[in-house]
Image (cartoon, rainbow, N blue to C red):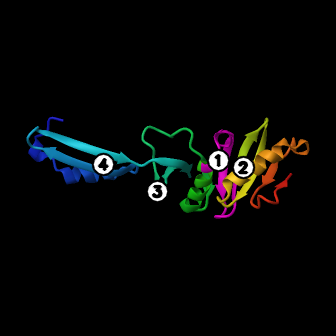
Amino acid sequence: MGEKLARIEPRSVEKLLGEMSWVKEVAVSRNWIKGDVAIVIKGRIPVGLYKGKAIDSSGTLFDMPGGKAKGLPTVSAATPELGLAAISLFTELPNDLRESLISMSAANGSAITSWHRESGRNVKITWGSPKEVELKVSVYRALLLLPENSNIRSADLSAPHAPIVR
């Protein structure tokens, strides 16, 4: 503020702002007629939390400005790519399963698991790969309706046509 317009170097301001991890794109321009500077910042959009940082859909890790975002899944995985696979599964889950989610993990692309709070107990769901999520959710809900499954602790839905409950 108060700096002479000729002394403002848009490229150096862009570089400085672009070094912030949450900034995806930045554009700085001077308007000589109006005598002002315009700064346009496009921030990264978090899709989950991975190793204490936000992660966007491209797999880029970044610090959230102003703290952690709420409502994002926390994922444990060996790589950001595996974390994104788990997050893609999370985004396909219906709202009630998203809200009951405690945590997610991905050992590899076909071994995604999650922990949910279900009727006062923790239930581990083994999803397998992020394919056929709608079918797997339907099978899980049908399993919960069976009286013999009233106290299940885990459900393996990796093969939805042959689920395993414990």
- Residue flagged by tag 2: what amino acid is it? Val
Residue 39 in view in this figure: yes
Where does residue 156 sit, x and y in percent of width and height?
Answer: 78, 56
User: How far apart, in angstroms, are the residues tagged by discs 1 and 3?
Assistant: 23 Å
What amino acid is found at the position of numbered circle 1 in the picture?
Leu
Which residue is identified by label 3? Answer: 60
The percent position of residue 103, horizontal first and vertical second, equals 66, 47
- Work out whether mark 4 precedes mark 3 in sequence or the reverse, and give the earlier one: 4
Q: Is residue 119 left or right of residue 96?
A: right
Dots 2 and 4: beta carbons under 8 Å? Answer: no
- Magenta stretch encompasses residue 96: yes
Q: Secondary structure at mark 2?
A: helix
Name the residue rendered at 65%, 43% in the picture.
94
Q: Can you identify the residue that label 2 sits on?
A: 137
Q: Amino acid at mark 3?
A: Thr
Q: In the image, what residue occupies the spot 76% across and 56% down?
A: 157
Residue at the spot of label 4? 17
Q: Position of residue 20 (x, y in %)?
A: 36, 49
Of residues 165 and 59, the one drawn nearer to the viewer in this rendering: 165
Q: Quadrant of residue 150?
A: top right
In the image shown, does 159 or 119 lie closer to the viewer? 159
> What amino acid is at disc 4?
Leu
Q: Which mark is residue 77?
A: none
CB within 8 Å, label 3 to label 2: no
Crowd rating for badge 3 (residues with CA inside 10 Å; few <14, some 14–19, many 20+): some
* Region in magenta: 92-114
Residue under label 1? 93
